[in-house]
Image: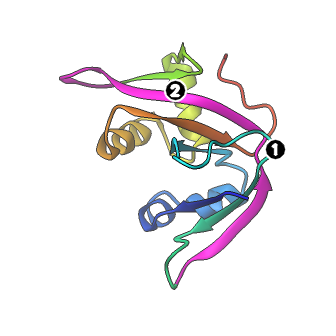
Amino acid sequence: MPAISYSKENIEKYNFANKILEGIKIHTIRRYRKKWIFTVGDHLVQYARQRSPVGFKIIKNKCLYVADIKIELLAPNIKELWIEINGVFLNFHLSESLAKNDGFENYEDFQIYFIKSGLPFYGQIIGWKEGIDYGN
């Protein structure tokens, strides 16, 4: 039963805990783990600040969607992202949907977050709602 934890910034700045409970945030994007690759059917336990004295469990649910994701800068001096899901490039419309489904207000917030986190990014989208589709 893999645990997914959200940082103080993600809880306070982006309000991820409430967005998960309200069904607005329907997936999370995580770097590949050394010891665990997420698969459909995994039982997920999601926490806010898991290893903190003020941490709490947000929800326990089931993984219903998994996809590989790659996020890179389009070009070295251009602050625009190249996003691939399962090897398929996402256009702007799908990138905006991805950002909102991941709990961000808009694509620009998503873009800033991932550039700040460090690129290139290779990982997985882990979803807990049926019907997630980015055209792959």
SS label for mark 1: loop
Side of 135 where 75 appears, left or right = left
Q: How many marks?
A: 2
Quadrant in which the C terminus is drawn: top right
Q: Residue 23 location, x and y as percent?
A: 73, 51
Disc 1 versus disc 2: nearer the observer: 1
Q: Quadrant location of residue 94?
A: top right
15 is higher (above) or lower (below) than 34: below
Q: Which mark is residue 95?
A: 2
Side of 26 where 123 appears, left or right = left
At x 61%, y 48%, the residue is 36
Q: How far is disc 1 from disc 2 in space, using C-alphas? A: 26 Å
At x 57%, y 33%, the residue is 98
Side of 46 where 41 appears, left or right = right
In magenta, the rendered stretch is 54-80
Query: What kind of residue is marked 1?
Result: Gly
Circles 1 and 2, Cβ within 8 Å, touching? The answer is no
Q: Residue 51 location, x and y as percent?
A: 51, 75
Q: Is residue 67 magenta?
A: yes
Q: Which mark is residue 41?
A: 1
Query: What kind of residue is marked 2?
Result: Ser
Q: Nearer the viewer, residue 114 or 86?
A: 86
Q: Residue 15 location, x and y as percent?
A: 54, 61
- Mark 1 / mark 2, whichever is N-terminal: 1
Quadrant in which the N terminus is drawn: bottom right
**For the view shown, which residue lies furthest in the front direction?**
35
Q: Is residue 11 magenta?
A: no
Q: Nearer the viewer, residue 35 or 29?
A: 35
**For the view shown, which residue lies furthest in the bottom direction?**
53
Q: Residue 43 location, x and y as percent?
A: 78, 54
5 is higher (above) or lower (below) than 66: below
